Image: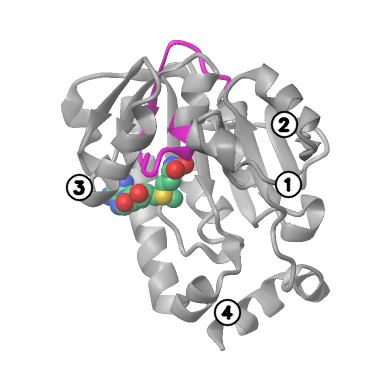
Amino acid sequence: MWFEERYGEVYGDLFDRFRAIRPRPALRVRFPEVAGRLRERGVRLEPVPWYGRGFFFEGDVSRELARGEVYLQDAASMLPPVLLEPEGEVLDMAAAPGSKATQLLEMGARVVANEPDALRRRVLERNLVRYDGWEIAGMRGEELWKLGRRFNRVLLDAPCTNTGTMSRRAVEMFTPARLRRMVRLQKALIRAALRVLEPGGLLIYSTCSIDPQENDGVVRAAVRRGMVPEFPLEGLRRTEFGYQLLPHDFGTEGFYAARLRQPL
Ligand SMILES: C[S@@+](CC[C@H](N)C(=O)[O-])C[C@H]1O[C@@H](n2cnc3c(N)ncnc32)[C@H](O)[C@@H]1O
């Protein structure tokens, strides 16, 4: 199979260590006091190291879920909003279903949430509706410059092969041709991100992929255009330009995030 062959080659013995790991269930609490209430009810919570309102959990959270007080989300995918240190207005270039957009709103940002796919945009809107401070755009990321706006904070959580999820679907769909198509799209999107980013501003590029070509390989194109990688967090697995979480590091999905600053 393509998947086994490629990642056996890329990661060697490490691949055997993380191949069979299933991510631990995790959630974000919308308000800090919700965590206390969950604990009182006997739900076991263990803090996610990089996000104060994120927890690995065991127990029944259906009541809080129905009230919109918790949001189920893989812990690794809570990383990009943290790296972005949101302030003011944030552009989320590929936003549906809205995990990171809602996290950014919780962190006090105003969010322009863009999603070109109409069906996915509807799900995004359903998730955003409980929050204030957002607007939705429906453009292909490559065309966002047509908005005529620049942003000091941009999140590009790019469409990818999903190899970090290790899901059966991702494994079955993986082919070298699909990987090449994704990388082409990702490079177009990261170039588009640079067009709308203000000088001095931050761009987070992230994927739920373990493939170096979709990750550092894409970021390299932005570094060649003058973007400067930053590493504000300690204790996470690093690559040349970003962080690459592997499933056995913390019991999350495989996930990549790079923080890049546009020089003044
Ligand atoms: C990894 S998902 C985003 C997940 C989302 N950020 C979240 O946290 O919930 C990638 C998204 O990119 C969208 N997409 C696909 N092609 C795109 C393009 N050319 N420009 C912008 N978004 C695109 C997909 O429809 C999909 O919703």
Name above or below for residue 22 compared with residue 253: below
Q: Which residue is mark 1?
A: 59
The residue that appears at 74% across and 67% down in the rendered structure is 21
Specify whether 247 is left or right of 177: right
**Dot 4: what SS?**
helix
Q: Which residues are magenta?
A: 85-101
The residue carrying pointer 3 sits among few (fewer than 14), some (14 to 19) or many (20 or more) residues within 10 Å by Cα, namely few
The residue that appears at 57% across and 37% down in the rendered structure is 63
Q: Which residue is mark 3?
A: 118
The residue carrying pointer 2 sits among few (fewer than 14), some (14 to 19) or many (20 or more) residues within 10 Å by Cα, namely some
Q: Which residue is mark 2?
A: 38
The residue carrying pointer 1 sits among few (fewer than 14), some (14 to 19) or many (20 or more) residues within 10 Å by Cα, namely few
Camera-nearest residue between 26 and 210: 26
Camera-nearest residue between 46 and 229: 46
Dot 4 or dot 3, earlier in sequence: 4
Q: Which residue is mark 4?
A: 3
Specify whether 6 is left or right of 158: right
Label 1 residue near ligand 1, CB within 8 Å:
no
Asked if the residue under mark 2 is in contact with the one under mark 4, i.e. CB atoms within 8 Å, the reply is no
Instruction: Name the residue type under label 1.
Output: Gly
Specify whether 60 is left or right of 194: right
The residue that appears at 61% across and 61% down in the rendered structure is 210
Dot 2 or dot 1, earlier in sequence: 2
Residue 154 screen position, x and y as percent:
42, 28
**Dot 3: what SS?**
helix
**Which residue sits furthest left?**
146
Q: CA distance from mark 1 to mark 4?
A: 33 Å
Dot 1 or dot 3, earlier in sequence: 1
Instruction: Name the residue type under label 2.
Output: Leu
